[in-house]
Image (spheres, rainbow, N blue to C red):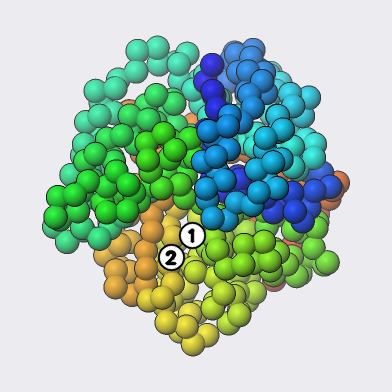
Amino acid sequence: MIISSLLDTDLYKFTMMQVVLHQFPGAEVEYRFKCRNAANLAPYVSEIREEIRSLCGLRFQDAELAYLKAMRFIKPDFIDFLGIFKLNEKYVTVTALPTGEIDVSIKGPWLHTILFEIPVLSIINEVYFRNTQKQPDLLEGRTRLTTKIAQLQADGLQDLKIADYGTRRRFGKSWHEEVLRTLASKLKTASGQSGNAGVLGQFAGTSNVLFAMKLGLTPLGTMAHEYLQACQALGPRLRDSQVFGFESWAKEYRGDLGIALSDVYGMSAFLRDFDMYFCKLFDGARHDSGDPFEWGERMLAHYLKNRVDPKTKTLIFSDGLTVPSTIELYKQFKGRCQLAFGIGTNLTNDLGYEPLQIVIKMIRCNGQPVAKLSDTPSKNMCDDERYLAYLRQVFDIAQP
């Protein structure tokens, strides 16, 4: 059984789920799977289905609920709901295609489907790699991890902090845990204190709630693309959907979890909506597509234009980072703002094999198409070209 706890997912799934419970409990959604690189997944459909069936037999344990309840932004009624929550297999279909690919569709109430994405992706990854790499080269993985740690410990980088964002594309659950334990024990401050608490060292924490609880790390996360995408169907009108999403988030968390995601409509559209009010209200923004150096410079200029000191704001970089690219970004923006870096696949699936570039994205909400138009066109995912054209027109987004 690959997934043995419903906490084995990213924190932002719970933060978004709480908003859904309180503000959009009747929303109906549809998600679709996509593999961006060629991989023959069809032979493993039966295994994937069996693992999903096991996932749907899980419930939150009392200790897990107590852990969530201790987070200052999680509300008691949400914990009560999770206490009776169970994923339902009827909302998921997995089908083998003649091409060797697979089709995965998740369709149903948003409140009851939002927790499928991360564990289903983790299942697909682990099923694939345990069949194609029956004797994984863990020594190579450890060597690569040791190199990354040495790079982070170079002179002048003691204030550079990284976080693990790699649950969805990890090589496997046990390797994920080993990576986290190694990072927590090896990344230290100049004074020699370990970063086990996710505060003192260069290892800031993990997006994975289960491992945060198990290893005493800081759980990290705010919102993901699906939240702002759903607002295209849930808000008063499409042009105001991004503003509606940010305002609904602020209504729920009252200044907590204040990192805005910037690339659902591209950076230019984000900056048009992220006015002085949001610049002051939110703690910062997260980059997830397009050139990160250009993005950072534009964010800093935008804060200055809106009479906000960039040094009081946090820029989070999380798009396909490696340790060398993280170090370059740190050097460019150090001292100009607060910085955070989330590294995913390069931490949790770097053993010498090509990782699966797989995603599950929301494509409909309440029967209406939804989409993101990021600054990296290959990341866009929508099956309705007319809607994409309309979205570009509404948000004044140029055709790539």
Q: Residue at left 66%, top 20%?
A: 57
Q: Quadrant of residue 229?
A: bottom right
- Please state the total of marks drawn on the protein image: 2
Q: Position of residue 149 (x, y in %)?
A: 22, 43
Q: Position of residue 211 (x, y in %)?
A: 43, 35
Q: Which mark is residue 287?
A: 1
Q: Is residue 115 above or below residue 234?
A: above
Task: Indicate the secondary structure of the residue bearing disc 2.
Answer: strand
Which one is in front in this view, the residue at disc 1 or the one at disc 2? 2
Q: Is residue 231 visible?
A: yes
Q: Quadrant of residue 345?
A: top left
Q: Position of residue 343 (x, y in %)?
A: 39, 46
Looking at numbered disc 1 in the image, what kind of residue is underneath it?
His
Q: Residue at left 41%, top 75%?
A: 312
Q: Is residue 47 above or below residue 75?
A: above
CA separation in Å, label 1 and label 2? 8 Å
Q: Position of residue 352 (x, y in %)?
A: 32, 28
Please tell me which residue lies in front, 271 or 64.
Answer: 64
Q: Residue at left 48%, top 80%?
A: 303
- Residue that badge 2 annotates: 315
